[in-house]
Image (tube, rainbow, N blue to C red):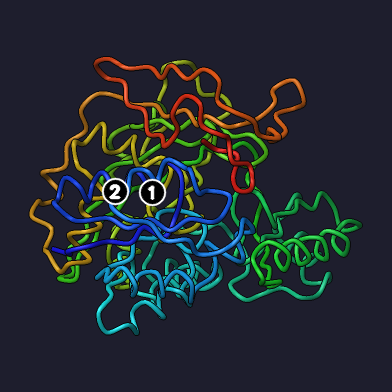
Amino acid sequence: MFRKVLVANRGEIAVRVMRACEELNVSTVAVYSEADTDSGHVRYADEAYNVGPARAADSYLDHEAVIEAARKADADAIHPGYGFLAENAEFAAKVEAEDAITWIGPKSDAMEQLGEKTNARRVMQEAGVPIVPGTTDPVTDPEEVKEFGEDHGYPVAIKAEGGGGGRGMKIVQGPDEAADQLQSAKREGEAYFDNDSVYVERFLENPRHIEVQILADHEGNVRHLGERDCSLQRRHQKVIEEGPSPALTDDLREKIGESARRGVSAAEYTNAGTVEFLVEEDPEREDGELLGSETNFYFLEVNTRIQVEHTVTEEITGIDIVKWQLRAAAGEEIDFGQDDVGIDGHAMEFRINAENAAEEFAPSPGGKLAIYDPPGGIGVRMDDALRQGDEIVTDYDSMI
């Protein structure tokens, strides 16, 4: 096991990782921007290093600053949390190139392979995992979009290679919109993900969004830890997640879970990750009726990191996913079989955001957390980094 882990993130996920480290007797190092000098993750860590000004590009996203902080702290591993550098294959490769520092996550080549969505679709298709009908090569010409629409019907979705959270995704209702929406998707891809490459796929109306948590070690062992239902979204961003899905039969659940295992095995993936699927909803399904094994489901994407909603899976399986990230990165072999993974009860996660509900949930301009009385008791879990009286830092994501 590692001696000291630098957590290249902030807020509640940084504290979550640090708690796992503490329970494994591993020291922790925080990095922080000038905006986060007094933030909770800085208080929680054993030591902390400033990596730049408030702007994320000059601090949390600065590869050299983060790696230099790890060198100064004599950390022997870096955990990226989620967001920021978590799915940045270039940064992972730089950490892997360091003699004395281990990357806690998938190998950079697997991240690159599965992070590029057209590559991921190709890998999954070759592994026999069903994918939404779409292109496996980037699309550059509006005529390609129109041809796809003629073959598969409208609407169709244009998606940015590096997209997520609804950004870089445009819906084309008819051929007249193809050119404008293609350019719009490319612009957003360039602006948000520094990648203007896009692809086209059939747009599924009102599917269920089901994702499967996986763990994999360096010995080729891959386990799935059941699924989470993330169908309740706002602006294509998840708000409430639950597990297990209240809509799936056990047969369909197992089919989707085994597809996830098969796909990541084919990519020689290691560490934690999530395989996301779209499951076709039956519009005539009655209350209490479940979707059976004949239901169509399609691969959507792989998140090559820990996710916000990992807590749901931890609560219903009793498996600490973050600890297993650390163990897998340290070379330990998964010590439980697929049949040992059981689902006990039901869990829901609610994301709490610094937003103004009266202004269509626009991000809050900040201020002090005047009153904070978090819930507690049996069956209640709160992951946070805030305390009453803290300043709300709004330079980054609104989720607190």
In the image, is residue 251 above or below residue 168? above
Q: Is residue 62 left or right of residue 395?
A: left
Residue at x 40% of width, y 30% of height: 242
Provide the secondary structure element on which disc 2 rests.
helix
Residue at x 20% of width, y 47% of height: 22
Residue position for label 2: 18
Q: Amino acid at mark 2?
A: Met
Residue 163 image point, x, y percent: 62, 59
Q: Quadrant of the N terminus?
A: bottom left
- The crowd level at tag 1 (other Cα within 10 Å; few <14, some 14-19, many 20+) is many
Q: Is residue 387 left or right of residue 281?
A: left
Taking depth in this image into account, of 192 and 124 the one nearest to the observer is 192
**Which residue is outermost to the left?**
335
Taking depth in this image into account, of 37 and 369 the one nearest to the observer is 37
Provide the secondary structure element on which disc 1 rests.
helix
Q: CA distance from mark 2 to mark 1?
A: 6 Å
Residue at x 64% of width, y 34% of height: 234
In the image, is residue 93 above or below residue 376? below
Residue position for label 1: 14
